[in-house]
Image (cartoon, rainbow, N blue to C red):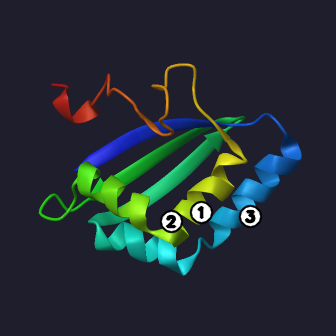
Amino acid sequence: MRYCLALDLKDDPVLIREYEQYHRRIWPEIAAHLRQHGVTGMEIYRLGTRLVMLMETDDAVYSPEQMAHAAGINPKVQEWEALMWQFQAATPWTAAGEKWAPMTRIFDLGQQD
Protein backbone atom coordinates (compact mmCIF):
# COMPACT_ATOMS: atom_id res chain seq x y z
CA MET A 1 0.00 0.00 0.00
CA ARG A 2 1.16 3.54 -0.65
CA TYR A 3 0.38 6.38 1.74
CA CYS A 4 0.86 10.10 1.11
CA LEU A 5 1.04 12.32 4.18
CA ALA A 6 1.70 16.02 4.79
CA LEU A 7 3.32 18.01 7.57
CA ASP A 8 4.75 21.50 7.84
CA LEU A 9 8.04 22.74 9.19
CA LYS A 10 8.51 25.85 11.29
CA ASP A 11 9.34 28.75 8.99
CA ASP A 12 12.97 29.14 10.06
CA PRO A 13 15.79 28.46 7.56
CA VAL A 14 18.19 27.38 10.31
CA LEU A 15 15.70 24.85 11.70
CA ILE A 16 14.88 23.59 8.21
CA ARG A 17 18.58 22.96 7.46
CA GLU A 18 18.95 21.14 10.78
CA TYR A 19 15.85 19.02 10.09
CA GLU A 20 17.21 18.04 6.70
CA GLN A 21 20.58 17.20 8.27
CA TYR A 22 18.88 14.78 10.70
CA HIS A 23 17.20 13.08 7.73
CA ARG A 24 20.41 12.52 5.78
CA ARG A 25 21.03 9.60 8.15
CA ILE A 26 18.19 8.87 10.59
CA TRP A 27 18.94 7.01 13.79
CA PRO A 28 19.30 3.27 13.19
CA GLU A 29 16.66 2.53 15.84
CA ILE A 30 14.12 4.61 13.91
CA ALA A 31 14.84 2.84 10.61
CA ALA A 32 14.58 -0.52 12.40
CA HIS A 33 11.24 0.49 14.00
CA LEU A 34 9.81 1.45 10.60
CA ARG A 35 10.97 -1.73 8.91
CA GLN A 36 9.83 -3.94 11.81
CA HIS A 37 6.31 -2.57 11.39
CA GLY A 38 6.04 -3.17 7.67
CA VAL A 39 7.28 0.10 6.18
CA THR A 40 9.18 -1.00 3.06
CA GLY A 41 9.87 2.43 1.60
CA MET A 42 9.68 6.04 2.68
CA GLU A 43 10.54 9.31 0.96
CA ILE A 44 10.03 12.87 2.21
CA TYR A 45 9.88 15.87 -0.13
CA ARG A 46 9.93 19.55 0.81
CA LEU A 47 8.64 22.71 -0.85
CA GLY A 48 9.22 25.71 1.38
CA THR A 49 7.86 24.63 4.75
CA ARG A 50 5.51 21.93 3.41
CA LEU A 51 6.63 18.31 3.66
CA VAL A 52 5.10 15.40 1.76
CA MET A 53 5.89 11.83 2.78
CA LEU A 54 5.37 8.85 0.49
CA MET A 55 5.30 5.62 2.46
CA GLU A 56 5.13 2.11 1.03
CA THR A 57 4.02 -0.72 3.30
CA ASP A 58 3.75 -4.48 3.38
CA ASP A 59 0.05 -4.92 4.13
CA ALA A 60 0.68 -8.36 5.65
CA VAL A 61 2.68 -6.65 8.41
CA TYR A 62 1.72 -2.97 8.55
CA SER A 63 -0.90 -1.77 10.99
CA PRO A 64 -1.03 1.96 11.81
CA GLU A 65 -2.51 1.19 15.23
CA GLN A 66 0.15 -1.38 16.15
CA MET A 67 2.93 0.85 14.89
CA ALA A 68 1.61 3.81 16.90
CA HIS A 69 1.30 1.65 20.01
CA ALA A 70 4.86 0.35 19.59
CA ALA A 71 6.13 3.90 19.06
CA GLY A 72 4.40 5.00 22.25
CA ILE A 73 6.30 2.49 24.36
CA ASN A 74 9.67 2.74 22.59
CA PRO A 75 11.88 5.30 24.38
CA LYS A 76 14.13 5.88 21.34
CA VAL A 77 11.16 6.53 19.04
CA GLN A 78 9.71 8.89 21.65
CA GLU A 79 13.06 10.71 21.85
CA TRP A 80 13.18 11.03 18.04
CA GLU A 81 9.59 12.30 17.86
CA ALA A 82 10.22 14.89 20.59
CA LEU A 83 13.34 16.06 18.75
CA MET A 84 11.54 16.26 15.40
CA TRP A 85 8.64 18.22 16.91
CA GLN A 86 11.12 21.05 17.56
CA PHE A 87 11.22 21.54 13.78
CA GLN A 88 7.73 20.45 12.77
CA ALA A 89 4.37 22.21 12.77
CA ALA A 90 0.98 20.69 12.07
CA THR A 91 -0.71 21.78 8.85
CA PRO A 92 -3.85 23.91 9.22
CA TRP A 93 -5.83 20.75 8.36
CA THR A 94 -4.14 18.35 10.78
CA ALA A 95 -6.30 16.97 13.58
CA ALA A 96 -5.41 18.08 17.11
CA GLY A 97 -2.70 15.95 18.68
CA GLU A 98 -1.52 14.52 15.35
CA LYS A 99 1.50 15.23 13.15
CA TRP A 100 1.52 13.73 9.68
CA ALA A 101 -1.89 14.13 8.02
CA PRO A 102 -3.05 11.79 5.25
CA MET A 103 -3.54 13.40 1.87
CA THR A 104 -6.36 12.53 -0.52
CA ARG A 105 -5.40 11.35 -3.99
CA ILE A 106 -7.30 13.37 -6.56
CA PHE A 107 -5.65 12.10 -9.77
CA ASP A 108 -4.16 8.83 -11.05
CA LEU A 109 -2.89 8.69 -14.63
CA GLY A 110 -3.32 4.91 -14.53
CA GLN A 111 -7.08 5.40 -14.30
CA GLN A 112 -7.22 7.54 -17.44
CA ASP A 113 -8.26 6.11 -20.82
Q: Nearer the viewer, mark 3 or mark 1?
A: 1
Using the numbered discs, state the Cα–Cα distance from disc 2 to disc 3 in whole angstroms. 18 Å
Name the residue beneath numbered marker 1.
80
Label 3: element kind: helix
Q: Are marks 3 and 1 in contact (CB under 8 Å)?
A: no
- In the drawing, what numbered circle is on residue 77? 2
The numbered mark, 2 or 3, whose residue comes first in the sequence reads: 3
- Residue at the far bottom in the pictured view: 28
Say above or below: 53 vs 96: below
Using the numbered discs, state the Cα–Cα distance from disc 3 to disc 1 in whole angstroms. 14 Å
Q: Are marks 2 and 1 in contact (CB under 8 Å)?
A: yes
In percent of width and height, residue 83 lies at 67, 57
Using the numbered discs, state the Cα–Cα distance from disc 2 to disc 1 in whole angstroms. 5 Å
Give the quarter of the figure containing the C terminus: top left
Name the residue beneath numbered marker 3.
21
Q: In the drawing, does residue 95 fall left or right of residue 14?
A: left
Which amino acid, by three-letter code, is at mark 1? Trp
